Amino acid sequence: MTTKDPIYKTDALIAEDIGAYLEAHQNKTMLRFITCGSVDDGKSTLIGRLLYDSKMIFEDQLAALEADSKRVGTQGGEIDFALLVDGLAAEREQGITIDVAYRFFATEKRKFIVADTPGHEQYTRNMVTGASTADLAVILIDARKGVLTQTRRHSYLVNLIGIRHVVLAVNKMDLVGYSQEVFDKIVEDYGTFARSVGITDFTAIPISGYKGDNITGPSENTPWYQGTALLPYLETVQVDVTADQAKPFRLPVQWVNRPNLDFRGFAGLIASGTVRPGDAVRVLPSGKTSTVARIVALEGDRDLAVAGESVTITLADEIDCSRGQVIVAAQAPLEVADQFEAALVWMDEVEMVPGRAYFLKIGTQTVSATVHQPKYEINVNTQEHLAAKTLDLNAIGIANITTDREIPFAPYTENRDLGGFILIDKITNRTVAAGMIHFALRRAQNIHWQAIDVTRESHAAMKNQKPAVLWLTGLSGSGKD
């Protein structure tokens, strides 16, 4: 590195004007990404290298890393960058990643949260957890092994979960002599598979996480590669943070804020859209309507709130609204249903039992749900639809789900927060599956049940009648009938 590198510029700014540094840091965009792929593809080593090269390691951490590398490292006494994220004793003993490890780091241009996910098939459920909040996926491939089954499984899940930015990092290029032929063959093989699962675009980069080739800048060992290095790509990839703001307003209620007799507000994270005082809103699933009276945040009342912000809103009318319900734009309500088709990723070692009741958690609401026999299971290698009576660990299938009451939702492709859910075993309280709603069953999508309070007067006006009671009386047998 030279003093012209962004990291050194940042250090200089901290020394000269800490206030300017803090302001610049606050205004940086955030990118959440995951590393995934098969076993021993070098995911943890890559993240460790990124942390090391971005100067996000303190001196005492570096000293501990050097000592740990000599004691339990896998690089012959040299620095083992994987130990920066593989902190569990079982991970260090086996040299593998078991649980998801989240790390934060920043450069001059952007802030990052990276999730290091396991490569073992047994821990695919952990990979799904890490991918559920990611904007970008770095799929690693060992240049010596090429595209493997777990590479295909993770790629399919990346597309299924809705991650649209994919980097194909062909790692350990130093172990194949930085061969362009090897790199091109892997990219061709992966491209054929990627197109079959719906990944239409990806960026391929030849790297060496251990040696540092094409991580922060171009490598002299790959003169045939003219593309960008990994970190500069992560700094500049365009993630549309305003897309959710352009959608209709949705606020899943997380908590009814009632500090005193004079205040009753509904707190939550805005899933999409914008809201202002005076906006007409509807509470689902009841369908009751009102208008927004106030928007209250930590700093006080606000005139505007947008997707991604946590706020408390108050309504002009006293209507029933509690945790789990969703406040939406009155003219663009969500669908409400109790039967759905959904994609399921089974995450428990105990197979799915069709007809058994599970807890279904979607947004801030938890309901009882029954999973029907799968329509089919998906073979991640061939995309073939297989007949299935149940789903085993790591299986991906399509099934119908019935809930015990109607819930507001959006298809997963439109909104992750209101279309993604988990299933929880009622006895063990384990999370057994992750799901993505496709669509509701039976009811047309353009039907919305209105909240109607019919009184004598409104009924008479609707029928153009005058209400009256006619009383026929007399002795039994006098002919009243």
Image (cartoon, rainbow, N blue to C red):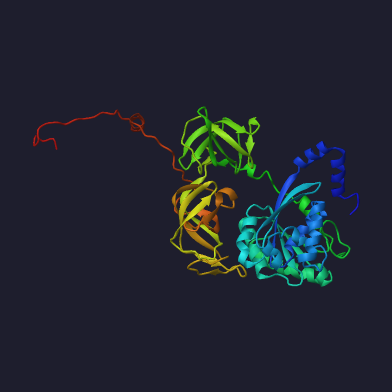
Front-lying residue, 320 or 200: 320
* Residue 127 versus residue 147 in the image, above or below: above
* Residue 105 versus residue 155 in the image, above or below: above
Name the spot of residue 395 as percent of width and height, x first. Answer: 56, 66
Residue at (45, 61) in percent of width and height: 372
On screen, residue 133 versus residue 388, left or right, reads right
Residue at (72, 58) in percent of width and height: 85
Name the spot of residue 48 as percent of width and height, x first. Answer: 77, 58
Residue at (43, 38) in percent of width and height: 451
Image quarter (top left, top right, bottom left or bottom right) of the C terminus: top left
- Evaluate whether residue 127 shows in this view: yes
Quadrant position of residue 266: top right
Image quarter (top left, top right, bottom left or bottom right) of the N terminus: bottom right
Name the spot of residue 260 as percent of width and height, x first. Answer: 52, 29
Name the spot of residue 190 as percent of width and height, x first. Answer: 71, 67
Tally the marks: 0
Front-lying residue, 317 or 75: 75
- Evaluate whether residue 209 shows in this view: no
Quadrant position of residue 23: top right
* Residue 333 versus residue 35 in the image, above or below: above
**Residue placed furthest toward the right:** 3
On screen, residue 188 versus residue 445, left or right, reads right
Quadrant position of residue 63: bottom right
